[in-house]
Amino acid sequence: MSYCTQLFSIEEFTFSETFQFAASVRVHSEHPIFTGHFPGSPILPGVTYIDCVKMLAEKAFGVTHCLKKAQSMKFLSLINPVNNAEIKAEGTFIKNNAVIAVKAVFFQLTQSNEKIITAKINAELIQ
């Protein structure tokens, strides 16, 4: 089990035959990573989004993947898991044998249902 598996849990997940996905992911604010990042003001480390992408791919395809290459990773706003522990993800997987290309956008919803984009990931995973 990945250390980050304990950080996230997938609450909702849809995956279409066109390889589109949508997910609701819970960030567990009591996870030990937040004692160091940052004490008294927890912020989700950007690098953990990659593990979340891997979890979503595993949910979609039923096999474990690891990062092959990250073409781009943009972290656009901070997530404090105490204030708002739910993040949404939408994107596309493109499967080519053992390699899966992924384009994902992570966001949070405001009370008026506006999207606040937190991260954009373009990466390749491999079995």
Image (cartoon, grey):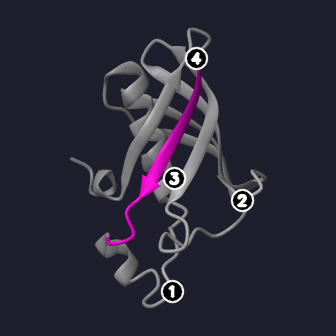
Residues drawn in magenta: 20-30
On residue 49, which mark appears? 3
First-in-chain label (2 vs 4): 4
Q: Are marks 2 and 4 in contact (CB under 8 Å)?
A: no
First-in-chain label (1 vs 2): 1
Q: Are marks 3 and 1 in contact (CB under 8 Å)?
A: no
**Looking at the image, is 1 positioned above or below residue 65?**
below
On residue 19, which mark appears? 4
First-in-chain label (1 vs 4): 4
Marks 3 and 2, how far apart at CA: 20 Å
Disc 4 packing (10 Å; few <14; some 14–19; many ≥20): some
Marks 2 and 4, how far apart at CA: 27 Å
User: Does residue 100 appear to the left or right of 61 in the view shown?
Assistant: right
Is residue 24 part of the magenta span, yes or no?
A: yes
Q: Which residue is mark 2?
A: 110
Residue 19 at least partly seen: yes
Marks 3 and 1, how far apart at CA: 19 Å
Residue 67 at least partly seen: no
In terms of secondary structure, where does tag 4 sit? Answer: loop
Marks 1 and 2, how far apart at CA: 20 Å
| Amino acid type, residue under disc 1 in the picture | Ser
| Amino acid type, residue under disc 3 in the picture | Tyr
In terms of secondary structure, where does tag 3 sit? Answer: helix
Q: Nearer the viewer, mark 3 or mark 1?
A: 1
Q: Are marks 3 and 2 in contact (CB under 8 Å)?
A: no
User: Does residue 62 appear to the left or right of 100 in the view shown?
Assistant: left
